Image: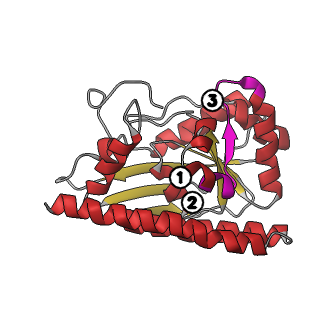
Amino acid sequence: MLIALRAGARAAGVFLVIPLGYLALLPALLALAPFPRARVDFTSWYFRRWAAAILAVLGITVRVSGVAPEPPFFMVSNHLGYVDIIVLASRLRCVFLAKREVRSWPLVGLICATLGTIFIDRGQRRDIPRVLAELEAAMARGLGVVIFPEGTSTRGATVEPFKSPLLALATRLGLPVHHATLRYETPASDPPAYLAVNWYGDTHFARHALGLLQVSRVEASLHLDPEPVAETDRKLLAERLRAAILARFEPMVGDGEGSAEPAR
């Protein structure tokens, strides 16, 4: 009974905070339309506060180690699910890269587009030049950009090999790349975080979200490494960044546990 009440209260909170937060954002964006830099600054500030409010409603606390880089910056992170976006957004002045399909999700896609999310067609390599240009433009506007080079979310047994094409922006511009490491924990009385928080495989979104709402609390660990990585070769850069994150990453599940299906 307590679990059902908790889930219901949190669902009500989410359905209030997300749509109302979006409606509150729109008038400000319209008013700031003639002032592009001020619009970017306000949207970034609002996104961080909005993300923090969503985390509070969901019962997620964030333990941060390290210091957030000053924008503009290029950052990579391991990827465990949609909660990653909210955690990182609550601490960083940035925009994210997401798969093209997210743009068509009801309300979520519209919100992501409004907040400056860059969408990529993962099945089309010819889409990469456009995406690289948009990432560079976002940095030119004074923002950080965050990508998940695993190209998929995982159950948290390890950090999958990084795909390197989007790192070509960093090697071309001579940018050092920052890296973040994410991990989640739930109390022993709740389902383990790799099931309750990580979203991977073929798990339906609504089913997963309901499970997340039922968890008593979640602790997110976010490590922001102070030493960015620079390389002139994108494949070597990908390898070094993955190694740096692996050095900080604590597996959330043993090799024999959880689904071994390819993550989404």
Who comes first in sequence, dot 3 or dot 2?
2
Q: Amino acid at mark 1?
A: Ile
Asked whether the viewer can see residue 22, the reply is: yes
Query: Is disc 2 placed on a helix, strand or loop?
Result: helix
Residue 9, located in which quarter of the rendered image? Answer: bottom left
Q: Amino acid at mark 3?
A: Lys
Measured from the top left, where is residue 15 in percent x and y?
43, 63
| Residue situated in front as seen by the camera: 84 or 20 | 20
Q: Residues within 10 Å of mark 2 (few under 14, many from 20)?
A: many
Residue 226, located in which quarter of the rendered image? Answer: bottom right
Determine which residue is flagged by label 3. Answer: 163
Q: Residues within 10 Å of mark 3 (few under 14, many from 20)?
A: some
Who comes first in sequence, dot 3 or dot 1?
1
Left or right of 222? Residue 147 is right
Highlighted range, magenta? 111-126
Query: Is disc 3 placed on a helix, strand or loop?
Result: loop
Residue 30, located in which quarter of the rendered image? Answer: bottom right
Query: Is disc 1 placed on a helix, strand or loop?
Result: helix
Residue found at x 54% / y 36%: 243
- Contact check, label 1 and label 2, Cβ < 8 Å: yes
Q: Residues within 10 Å of mark 1 (few under 14, many from 20)?
A: some
Determine the CA span between mark 3 and mark 1: 19 Å
Q: Is residue 117 magenta?
A: yes
On residue 8, which mark appears?
Answer: none
| Residue situated in front as seen by the camera: 20 or 95 | 20
On residue 85, which mark appears?
Answer: 1
Residue found at x 71% / y 35%: 166
Measured from the top left, where is residue 153 in percent x and y?
48, 37
Determine which residue is flagged by label 2. Answer: 89
